[in-house]
Amino acid sequence: MLGLRVVVADDSVLLREGLVRVLTEAGVEVLASYRDADALLADLEGQQPQLIVLDVRMPPTFRDEGVRAAIRARELLPTVGILLLSQYVEVAYAQELLSSGRGGIGYLLKDRVASLADLSDAIERIAAGGTVLDPEVVAQLIGRRNDPLATLTPREHEVLALMAEGRTNAAIGAALVIGVGAVEKNVTAIFQKLGLDDSGTDHRRVLAVLAWLQR
């Protein structure tokens, strides 16, 4: 993550400056920080960041400015990573951001980012094209899709939730205390039961999970 170019946007000066400090301490190059989405977007192409960290609710209406800015940022810089930080689970906004089916996206709850290590891990995975979703966001997204999940076993539910957080098979196995082979069998069963074809691409897992979440 050393030298990763990042910009930060949050209307709270304390949170904004706090993020700048912890990111700098983690070896990130913070190019600029902004208090609102308009200022961020006006400066974006000049800064050319690799990742944007921003709040969901920002001035002037404190509704969805951050999500709108993230979508517009992806239009201006198609490869830029996006990490949304929020105090709330905004399921509709999460779905809108994920609707493109592309990786490099994160949605974390501010109060649940427990350490600098957690934040650094999330940023690294997003910058590498992964998808990082807070477990509470995952739970609410899954909760909206009971029918497609009806055939999944309890273990497959657990594996799918961890997949949606961007975890590898090894990490899923460690979290659930099962072998990697068992994880692979569950992953295969999940794809089969949800009718998700193997596209053969490097990001099949991320794309498959996002495609299912957006059905």
Image: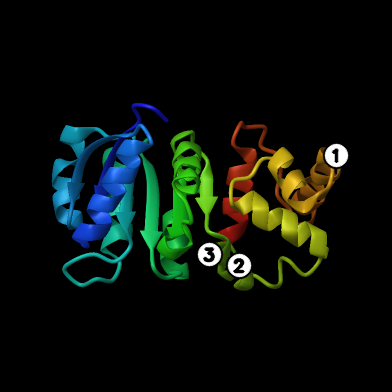
Residue 9 visible (yes or no): no
The kind of residue on which mark 1 rests is: Gly
Q: Secondary structure at mark 1?
A: helix
Q: x and y percent of residue 161 in the render?
A: 66, 57
Q: x and y percent of residue 141 in the render?
A: 57, 66
Pick the residue in front: 87 or 93.
87
Task: Give the residue number, with chain letter if any, for mark 2.
Answer: 139
Q: Quadrant of residue 62?
A: bottom left
Pick the residue in front: 148 or 56.
56
Q: CA distance from mark 3 to mark 2?
A: 5 Å
Which quadrant is the N terminus positioned in? top left
Residue 64 horizontal side relative to residue 182, left or right: left
Q: CA distance from mark 1 to mark 3?
A: 27 Å
Q: Colour mode?
A: rainbow
Q: How many marks?
A: 3
Residue 158 visible (yes or no): yes
Q: Is residue 149 above or below residue 171?
A: below
Q: Earlier in the sequence, mark 1 or mark 3?
A: 3
Which quadrant is the C terminus positioned in? bottom right
Mark identifier at residue 30: none
Mark 1 Cα shell of 10 Å, populated few (<14), some (14-19), many (≥20):
few
